[in-house]
């Protein structure tokens, strides 16, 4: 029986969440069932991704290919789960499962009512399915459709809280994101016009032989794609929508938006740059230098902006802007170490940022305090939550034995290999800046006395309930696990990097 | 020179697309009225639809229906038009969602001007902080 399912696995991981998402509204009144279904899909998805990754790993990188509707490429839409796809599938399913466990805890309280939380789960599963689709798709127009599904479900999640500010943030996000996807669609149009293919491999082959005939169209396509995904992935000067959207969303949504949705767009950008244009063309059009520069600016500017925020979730949101900078910088290094580091860093940041946002959400739900300056002594009141926050912070700073270190280490090796001083200096400086905006939170939480408990303003906060604790423990454990035993995931990232760079 | 101009004029749909795109982008970025922003987005999207459809068109081509009557004729590429059907569906759903958000904002603030909303919000925030002290 397994033999018949294995070839279909790449499509199952995508359609299972989509299918359940559309079934969920029928059970909207039975919240327990809804939650159980969401978690079941999460577990099944994770097991599927794990099995797929082990298959790809055992086959030394020969990908699993599924042609939708039985139409072979270049006519049909092709799903391809290779090293890169398996890696990102693992990240998507591995992060969204703990987050859905966390959401089970106090989602209804956060979005205002049971009915609304059922709708939240619909969007949540749509987002998960579309992100899984981004991991495995090998078709240009399919990317656009998935990008739009992710955008719409993200905007829905941002507007989930019944508050006008949420609607405003969602509207701003929607306008900026649609601007981005319109540009992406234009870019796809230009690529199709000169290559006549929508399948990435066929388009790449065609592009490599004919780009000299129409360099201006290639320029247009590249700039549309870069700016389009730049807006969607919040690369520095185009990040303006992100802090509002990510800080007003309910906490599980913030975790998924910062941890996964932004990464989905970056994976798409990576696929366009390496699988369609190829690294030779990137060098020809100086895209690598643009990416390194944009990444460097984002790291520094994002960190400084994060430093000036007092609201905890906003600080984390600006930190995402800085961390996206690392990934963009890594995309421009164009060597194996750097690209492997980028992919590993992408995975590790997805886990770390989700941990941080969930811990922040638990603190805000328990205390009602949103600001860093109000969190004195919270470490003793909520030991487990704060421990998870601390592990996440240390991971983000990049201390050894935490997952962030491995990614940053390889990024650093890649930067040194390019022989240019800018990326090397910025990667190190970014870590120091990261410490300056996260460590004060921890210092305040552990080493400052809690305010007078007789004060009526201060309810006695406690660690959250069981499922939320479990989610925090799981995520923090992954952060440490990936730092201590990076082996298999790092190997997958290295193989994916080699594959992306050889495909010229 | 004459030849160049001839080619430029022959490709007028792309100029129309470029102009539409700029009108749309300008509207989105400079207007603070939420509805106008949304209309701008829609104009931008139409520009991209036009680029796709014009790219698939061949002058003098016929619809790709295989029959004896038009065997040997030049067929236009139907794929970009089919893709743009998907694009239009996506753009309609984005518009619907954005309109729903505008209704919610109008109910909350009584205006759909983004600057006015920002002003109202800062007034509310000021009231809150006064209330606390």
Image (cartoon, coloured by chain):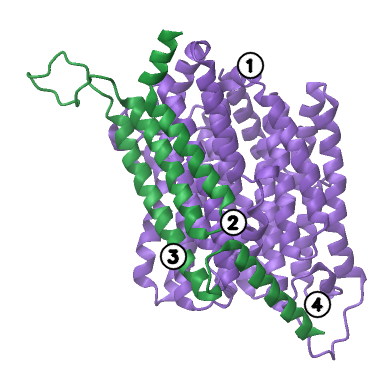
Chain colours: A purple, B green
Badge 1 is on which residue?
A284
**Distance between mark 2 and mark 4 Cα atoms:** 26 Å
SS state under label 4: helix
Q: Are marks 4 and 1 on the same chain?
A: yes
In primary-sequence order, the first of circles 2 and 4 is 2
Q: Are marks 2 and 3 on the same chain?
A: no
* Cβ atoms under marks 2 and 1 closer than 8 Å: no
Picture disc at residue A129: none
- For residue A100, say whether it is visible: no
Q: Please tell me whether residue B112 is drawn above or below residue A279 in the rendered image.
A: below
Residue A146 coordinates in the image, percent (x, y): 45, 44
Q: Please tell me whether residue A168 is drawn above or below residue A364 in the rendered image.
A: above
Identify which residue is drawn at 30% across, 34% down. Answer: B81
Mark 2 surroundings within 10 Å by alpha-carbon count, few (fewer than 14), some (14 through 19), many (20 or more) = many
Badge 3 is on which residue?
B100
Q: Are marks 1 and 3 on the same chain?
A: no
In primary-sequence order, the first of circles 4 and 1 is 1
Badge 2 is on which residue?
A256
Q: Are marks 2 and 1 on the same chain?
A: yes
Badge 4 is on which residue?
A381
Query: Chain ID for label 2?
Result: A
Disc 2 or disc 3, which is closer to the eye?
A: 3
Disc 2 or disc 4, which is closer to the eye?
A: 2
Residue A425 coordinates in the image, percent (x, y): 86, 34
């Amino acid at each position: 029986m397994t033999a018949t399912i294995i070839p279909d696995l790449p499509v199952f991981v995508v359609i299972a969440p989509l299918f359940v998402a559309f079934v969920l509204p029928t059970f909207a009144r039975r919240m327990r069932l809804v939650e159980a279904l969401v978690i079941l899909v999460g577990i099944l998805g994770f097991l599927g991704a794990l099995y797929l990754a082990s298959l790809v790993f055992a086959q030394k990188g020969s990908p699993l290919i599924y042609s939708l509707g039985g139409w072979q490429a270049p006519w049909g839409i092709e799903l391809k789960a290779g090293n890169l796809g398996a890696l990102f599938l693992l990240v998507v399913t591995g992060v969204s499962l703990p987050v859905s466990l966390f959401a089970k805890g106090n989602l209804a309280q956060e979005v205002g009512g049971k009915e609304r939380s059922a709708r939240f789960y619909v969007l949540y599963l749509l987002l998960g399915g579309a992100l899984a689709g981004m991991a495995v798709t090998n078709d240009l127009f399919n990317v656009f459709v998935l990008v739009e599904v992710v955008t719409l479900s993200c905007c829905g999640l941002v507007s989930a809280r019944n508050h006008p500010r949420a609607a405003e943030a969602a509207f701003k996000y929607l306008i900026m994101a649609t601007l981005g996807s319109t540009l992406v669609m234009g870019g796809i149009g230009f690529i199709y016009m000169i290559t006549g293919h929508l399948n990435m491999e066929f388009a790449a082959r065609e592009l490599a032989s004919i780009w000299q005939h129409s360099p201006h169209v290639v320029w247009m396509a590249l700039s549309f794609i870069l700016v389009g995904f730049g807006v969607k992935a919040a690369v520095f000067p185009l990040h303006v929508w992100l802090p509002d959207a990510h800080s007003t969303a309910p906490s599980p949504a913030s975790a998924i938006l910062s941890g996964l949705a932004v990464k989905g767009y970056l994976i798409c950008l990576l696929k366009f740059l390496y699988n369609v244009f190829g690294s030779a063309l990137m060098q020809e059009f100086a895209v690598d230098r643009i990416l390194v520069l944009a990444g460097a600016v984002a790291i520094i500017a994002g960190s400084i902006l994060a430093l000036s925020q007092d609201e905890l979730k906003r600080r984390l949101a600006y930190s995402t802007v800085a961390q996206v900078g690392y990934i963009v910088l890594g995309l421009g290094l164009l060597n194996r170490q750097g690209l492997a580091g980028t992919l590993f860093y992408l995975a590790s940041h997805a886990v770390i940022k989700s941990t941080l946002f969930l811990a922040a959400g638990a603190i805000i739900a328990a205390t009602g305090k949103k600001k860093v300056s109000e969190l004195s002594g919270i470490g003793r009141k909520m030991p487990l939550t704060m421990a998870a926050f601390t592990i996440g912070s240390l991971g983000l700073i990049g201390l050894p034995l935490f997952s962030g270190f491995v990614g940053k280490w390889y990024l650093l090796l890649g930067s040194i290999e390019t022989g240019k001083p800018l990326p090397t200096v910025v990667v190190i400086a970014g870590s120091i800046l990261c410490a300056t905006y996260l460590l004060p939170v921890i210092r305040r939480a552990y080493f400052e006395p809690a305010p007078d408990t007789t004060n009526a303003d201060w309810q006695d906060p406690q660690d959250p309930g069981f499922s939320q604790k479990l989610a925090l423990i799981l995520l923090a454990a992954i952060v440490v696990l990936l730092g201590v035993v990076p082996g298999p995931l790092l190997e997958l990232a290295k193989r994916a990097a080699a594959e992306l760079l050889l495909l010229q | 020179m004459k030849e160049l101009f001839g080619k430029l004029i022959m490709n007028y749909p792309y100029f129309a697309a470029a102009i539409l795109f700029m009108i749309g982008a300008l509207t989105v970025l400079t207007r603070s009225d939420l509805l106008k922003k949304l209309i701008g987005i829609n104009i931008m999207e139409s520009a991209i639809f036009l680029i796709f459809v014009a790219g698939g068109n061949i002058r003098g081509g016929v619809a790709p229906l295989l029959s004896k009557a038009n065997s040997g004729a030049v067929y236009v590429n139907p794929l970009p038009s089919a893709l743009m059907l998907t694009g239009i569906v996506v753009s309609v759903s984005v518009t619907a969602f954005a309109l729903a958000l505008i209704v919610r904002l109008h109910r909350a603030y009584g205006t759909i001007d983004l600057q006015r909303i920002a002003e109202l919000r800062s007034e509310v925030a000021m009231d809150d902080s006064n209330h606390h002290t």
